[in-house]
């Protein structure tokens, strides 16, 4: 750690919370240089849905590299790209009757967000975009403007240009339909809101504290977008790729966004991002939005291997089984302890402790017990359970036991005895 503290910028983050030197990883576990095992309930902030070193990815990458497959190809046609396009169309787009075109962007999620917003502005010939309270869309300047949390902002970044943040579902409390306010702003000539080109949202806000938009709210938002000629962009970077239970997080609501941003788990740990958009929105000129690392070849290979998970609904059913188990255990803990709130869906769950310092102390105590779990929310008050989707029930129970013990060590009055930890 001394070398890291000496040379790596103060901007470093996770290494401060989880100060170990990791050397190997497999499935839902990380191992440090001393061979100590840690359970991973963080999954690279949603990048490792299919587990660390998924065997299918490992084999495909080793074969590809030993065959001298291209490491880099700009946006040339390659066999790796064609294989990816074929399986993405067959296993993801066609079964959902989605007729999207695909733009490969630079490798990080924020690159996909930038491309989507830029295209929306070009198509609609309007600069304004609506994002939501607690939304998180990345840190390059365009994406940062859409990100809510003040922690990341500084007035010198010129941060919220051409963006309005409106209340997300539930932001004003249960029983208030926040879209009534949005509708009023759109229809009132004096509201001060310019007609937006697009509305961007996460259907489940992950970094923002595991806030789940209801299906009816999403359907009403989609209708509002159609009514007022605004493009609906779903940022599925963290909660796509099966995290919500389906491949896309919006499937259950039955909406079809105009654009979708995907990244993180798509490449199984290899940097990879893309934007999907309806065919008529493909108004780019050749090379108008470019970048050296679009369409990472190794990520094409990894993603092709992983998309086999979606050739039928077996994987969704496995996620659903694990989700019911996780939900059962977490809700028992929350019910036994007043003042806690459980949020989530599919395989993204959060316990709201209502206090960022308390959540940080529990996360630290978890790490001391070799469990990696991070906080989310405007003040970091929510502990986020984001393990790989391939985690076994036994692994979850092992981690849950560490978590419950860590919770009790920080809050000695916490009731965890009733949870039958050993018998789970
Ligand atoms: N959008 C969402 C919903 C995210 O969760 C993230 C990252 O956590 C991003 C965008 C930015 O992705 P990246 O950090 O790869 O740039």
Image: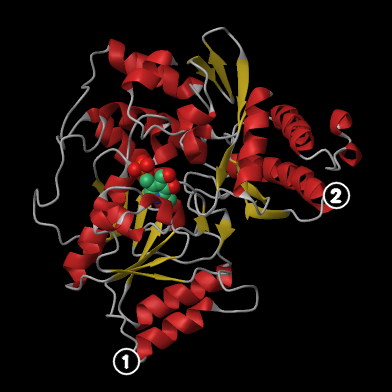
The N terminus is located in which quarter?
top left
Specify whether 298 is left or right of 369.
left
Q: Does 33 appear above or below 220?
A: above
Q: Which of 129 and 282 is in front in this view?
A: 129
Label total for image: 2
Which residue occupies 19% across, 26% down? 72
Which residue occupies 20% across, 30% down? 78
Would residue 408 be seen by someone viewing this image from the given angle?
yes
User: Residue 174: image x %, image y %?
Assistant: 65, 73
Q: Which of 151 and 26 is in front in this view?
A: 151
Specify whether 150 is left or right of 125.
right
Per the image, label 1 sits on a secondary structure element best described as loop
Per the image, label 2 sits on a secondary structure element best described as helix
Q: Which mark is residue 190?
A: 1
Q: Does the residue labelled 2 lie within 8 Å of ligand 1?
A: no
Gap in angstroms between the C-alphas marked 1 and 2: 49 Å
Q: Nearer the viewer, residue 206 or 6?
A: 6
Q: What residue is shown with label 2?
A: 336
Would residue 236 be seen by someone viewing this image from the given angle?
no
User: Residue 256: image x %, image y %?
Assistant: 42, 65
The C terminus is located in which quarter?
top right
Specify whether 322 is left or right of 378.
right
**Residue at the farthest bottom position:** 189
User: Residue 173: image x %, image y %?
Assistant: 62, 73
Is tag 1's residue or tag 2's residue first in the polypeptide sequence?
1
Q: Does 204 appear above or below 62?
A: below
Q: Residue 314 carries which label?
A: none
């Amino acid at each position: 750690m001394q070398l890291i503290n000496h040379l790596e910028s103060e901007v470093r983050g996770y290494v401060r919370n989880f100060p170990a030197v990791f050397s190997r990883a497999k499935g839902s576990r990380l191992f440090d240089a001393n061979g100590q095992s840690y359970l991973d309930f963080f999954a690279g902030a949603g990048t490792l849905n299919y587990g660390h070193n998924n065997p299918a990815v490992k084999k495909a990458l080793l074969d590809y590299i030993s065959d001298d497959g291209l490491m880099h190809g700009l946006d040339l046609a390659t066999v790796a790209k064609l294989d990816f396009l074929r399986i993405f169309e067959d296993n993801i787009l066609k079964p959902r009757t989605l007729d999207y075109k695909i733009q490969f962007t630079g490798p990080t999620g924020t690159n996909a967000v930038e491309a989507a917003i830029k295209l929306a502005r070009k198509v609609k010939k309007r600069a304004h975009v609506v994002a939501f309270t607690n939304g998180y869309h990345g840190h390059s300047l365009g994406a940062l403007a859409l990100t809510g949390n003040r922690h990341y902002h500084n007035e010198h970044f010129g941060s919220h240009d051409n963006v309005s943040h409106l209340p997300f579902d539930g932001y004003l409390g249960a029983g208030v339909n926040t879209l009534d306010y949005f509708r009023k702003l759109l229809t009132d000539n004096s509201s001060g809101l310019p007609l937006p080109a697009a509305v961007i949202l996460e259907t489940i806000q992950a970094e923002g504290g595991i806030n789940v938009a209801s299906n009816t709210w999403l359907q009403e938002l989609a209708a509002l977008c159609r009514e007022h000629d605004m493009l609906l962009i779903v940022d599925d970077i963290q909660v796509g790729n099966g995290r919500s239970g389906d491949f896309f997080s919006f499937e259950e609501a039955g909406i079809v966004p105009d654009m979708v941003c995907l990244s993180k788990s798509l490449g199984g740990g290899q940097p990879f991002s893309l934007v999907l958009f309806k065919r008529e929105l493909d108004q780019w000129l050749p090379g108008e939005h470019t970048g050296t690392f679009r369409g990472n070849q190794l990520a094409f290979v990894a993603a092709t291997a992983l998309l086999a998970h979606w050739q039928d609904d077996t994987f969704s059913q496995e996620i659903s089984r694990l989700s019911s188990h996780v939900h059962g255990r977490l809700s028992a803990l929350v019910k036994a302890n007043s003042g806690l709130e459980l949020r989530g869906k599919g395989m993204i769950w959060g316990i709201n402790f209502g206090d960022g310092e308390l959540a940080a102390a529990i996360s630290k105590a978890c790490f001391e017990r070799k469990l990696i779990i991070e906080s989310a929310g405007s003040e970091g008050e929510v502990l986020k359970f984001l393990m790989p989707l391939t985690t076994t029930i036994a692994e979850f129970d092992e981690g849950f036991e560490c978590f419950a013990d860590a919770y009790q060590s920080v809050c000695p009055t916490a009731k965890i005895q009733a949870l039958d930890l050993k018998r789970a």
